[in-house]
Image: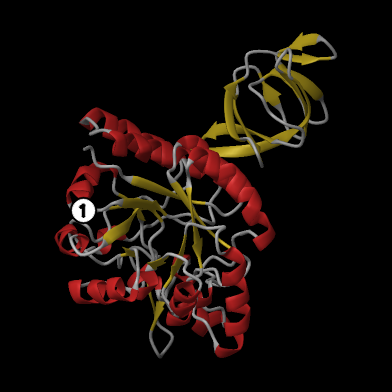
C-alpha cells in the first residue's frame, strides 16, 4: 500500500483557507482569537467553525485548532468554555500546556503536541503517547536521523517551509524583554528581524558584515523532501499564518507535487523558482541536514520575493453566462498583465488579460477610476484584483 502523506497548510483567514484547499492541502491549521501563537493573524471566531466545516468536510480536509500559548490560572475557565464549544467542530487540537491537554482528555478531543514542547527524544515521545497524544510536532532543532528514531514511536509532523525563529523551537523572550509583548502568548513583534549595531560600554560601534544577526533565513526542504519521507515524517507542515493567500497557494502547489511523486532535479529547480516568487528571506535547510551556520542568517530587510502583487481594484459584478467581470480600478491595468483575484469564498483565480473593454469599446489599457470589463473564470462581487509585477533583486 502506497504511503499517504499529509500536507498541512496555514489558514489565518478565509481566503487563505480556501486557497490552501484548492491548491491541494490535506489539512489546515488555524487559531481562534483566543490562545493563539499568532495573535497578529486575523484568526477565526468560534462562530466561524461551522463555516469552516462546510468548506472542509466535502473535500475531506482535516481541521486542526491551535491552542498552543502559555495558559494562566485566571484563563482556565475561559479555556474550558472554548474547548467545550469546539468539540466535534475540529479534528484535533494542537497544544502543549498540560491544562489544555487535560481538558482535551476530559472532553475526548484528539490532541497533538505542539513544537512549543520542544520534543527532542524518544522517552519524551513515549511520555506524550502514553498521555494520549495522537501526534507530535517535533522540535525544529532535530536532524533527520533523530526524527527517524522518534517516528517509530508515534506519528510525527515536521515543518517543511516558511519562517524560522532564532530561538529554540520558537520559545523566544526578546519581544517580551524589549516591548512587553510575549512570543509565548502569540504577541511577538519580531525584533529578531531588525538590523543591529554592536556597541561597547564606551559607545564605540562596530560595523558587522551582516547586521541582521538574529534573523534566520526561511526553511525550504524541497531539495531533500524524499529524505524527509524516508525519515518517517507523516505530516508535512507549511509555516505562515501571517502571510497571504497567494503565498499559501504557491507553496501548497509546489509541495503537493513533491509529496505525490519523486521530483526530478529539473522539477525541484522549477519548484524553487516558484517558491522564490512569494515572500521569503532566502532559503535554508534548517537543522535537518546539518547544524546551521552564519550562512543560515539572512541579510534581507523584508523579502526576497521575485514577484509582488499590486492591488488594482475590486469586482463590481460578474456576468456568469458570458464569463465577464466588471472591475472598478484604483490603479492602471493593461492587456497582457498577469492578475490574480482573491475572494473570501473563491480562493485564488489567475488570469492573463487578453482584452479590456470600457463601455463596450476595446482598449489596450485602463487607468485609475475606470470601470472595465474583462473575461475571467468565476469570481464574485467585492473579490480583490491584483496585478503581478516582477521584482529585480
Measured as percent of width and height from the top left, residue 270 is found at: 33, 31
Question: Disc 1 marks which residue?
Answer: 232
The image's colour scheme reads secondary structure
Q: Is residue 56 above or below residue 126?
A: above
Relative image position of residue 157 (x, y in whole percent):
32, 58
Q: Is residue 88 left or right of residue 113?
A: right
Name which residue lies at 38% across and 61% down.
Answer: 164
Residue projecting furthest to the top: 361
Asked which quadrant contains residue 242, the reply is bottom right
Q: Is residue 147 left or right of residue 191?
A: left
In this rendering, the answer to whether 236 lies above or below 46 is: above
293 in relation to 277, above or below: below
Which one is nearer the viewer's eye here, 255 or 77?
77
Evaluate whether residue 392 shows in this view. Answer: no
Depth check: 174 or 238 in front? 238
Q: Residue at x 54, y 86 (%)?
A: 72
**Which residue sits furthest right?**
359
Q: Secondary structure at mark 1?
A: loop
Confirm whether residue 123 shows in the render: yes
Check the picture and name the quadrant holding the C terminus.
top left
Q: Which one is in front, 207 or 287?
A: 287
Instruction: Check the picture and name the quadrant holding the N terminus.
Output: top left
> Callout 1: few (<14), some (14-19), or many (20+) C-alpha neighbours within 10 Å?
many
**Whole-percent x, y for residue 17 in the image:** 56, 46
Residue 80 spot, x, y in % from top left: 58, 77
Amino acid at each position: 500500500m502506497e504511503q499517504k502523506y499529509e500536507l498541512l497548510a496555514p489558514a489565518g483567514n478565509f481566503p487563505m483557507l480556501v486557497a490552501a484547499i484548492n491548491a491541494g492541502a490535506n489539512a489546515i491549521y488555524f487559531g481562534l482569537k483566543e490562545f493563539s501563537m499568532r495573535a497578529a493573524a486575523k484568526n477565526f471566531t468560534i462562530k466561524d467553525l461551522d463555516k469552516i466545516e462546510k468548506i472542509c468536510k466535502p473535500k475531506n480536509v482535516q481541521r486542526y485548532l491551535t491552542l498552543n500559548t502559555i495558559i494562566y490560572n485566571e484563563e482556565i475557565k475561559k479555556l474550558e468554555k472554548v474547548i467545550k464549544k469546539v468539540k466535534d467542530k475540529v479534528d484535533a487540537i494542537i497544544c502543549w500546556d498540560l491544562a489544555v491537554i487535560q481538558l482535551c482528555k476530559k472532553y475526548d478531543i484528539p490532541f497533538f503536541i505542539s513544537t512549543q514542547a520542544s520534543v527532542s527524544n524518544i522517552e519524551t515521545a513515549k511520555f506524550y503517547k502514553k498521555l494520549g497524544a495522537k501526534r507530535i510536532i517535533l522540535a525544529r532543532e532535530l536532524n533527520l536521523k533523530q526524527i527517524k528514531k522518534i517516528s517509530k514511536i508515534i506519528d510525527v509532523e515536521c515543518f517543511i517551509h516558511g519562517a524560522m525563529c532564532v530561538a529554540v523551537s520558537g520559545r523566544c523572550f526578546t519581544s517580551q524583554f524589549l516591548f512587553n509583548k510575549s512570543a509565548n502568548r502569540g504577541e511577538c513583534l519580531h525584533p529578531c528581524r531588525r538590523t543591529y549595531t554592536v556597541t561597547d560600554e564606551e559607545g564605540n560601534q562596530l560595523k558587522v558584515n551582516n547586521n541582521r544577526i538574529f534573523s534566520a533565513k526561511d526553511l525550504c526542504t524541497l531539495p531533500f523532501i524524499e529524505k524527509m519521507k524516508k525519515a518517517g515524517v507523516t505530516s508535512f507542515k507549511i509555516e505562515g499564518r501571517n502571510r497571504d493567500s497567494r503565498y499559501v497557494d504557491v507553496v501548497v502547489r509546489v509541495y503537493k507535487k513533491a509529496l505525490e511523486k519523486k521530483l526530478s532535479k529539473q522539477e525541484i529547480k522549477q519548484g524553487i523558482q516558484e517558491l522564490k516568487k512569494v515572500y521569503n528571506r532566502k532559503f535554508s535547510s534548517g537543522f535537518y541536514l546539518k547544524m546551521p551556520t552564519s550562512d543560515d542568517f539572512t541579510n534581507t530587510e523584508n523579502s526576497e520575493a521575485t514577484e509582488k502583487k499590486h492591488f488594482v481594484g475590486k469586482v463590481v459584478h460578474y456576468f456568469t453566462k458570458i464569463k465577464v467581470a466588471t472591475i472598478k480600478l484604483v490603479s492602471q491595468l493593461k492587456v497582457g498583465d498577469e492578475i490574480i483575484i482573491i475572494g473570501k469564498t473563491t480562493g485564488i483565480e489567475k488570469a492573463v488579460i487578453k482584452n479590456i473593454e470600457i463601455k463596450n469599446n476595446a482598449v489596450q489599457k485602463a487607468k485609475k477610476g475606470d470601470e472595465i470589463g474583462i473575461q475571467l473564470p468565476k469570481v464574485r462581487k467585492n473579490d480583490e484584483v491584483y496585478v503581478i509585477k516582477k521584482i529585480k533583486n
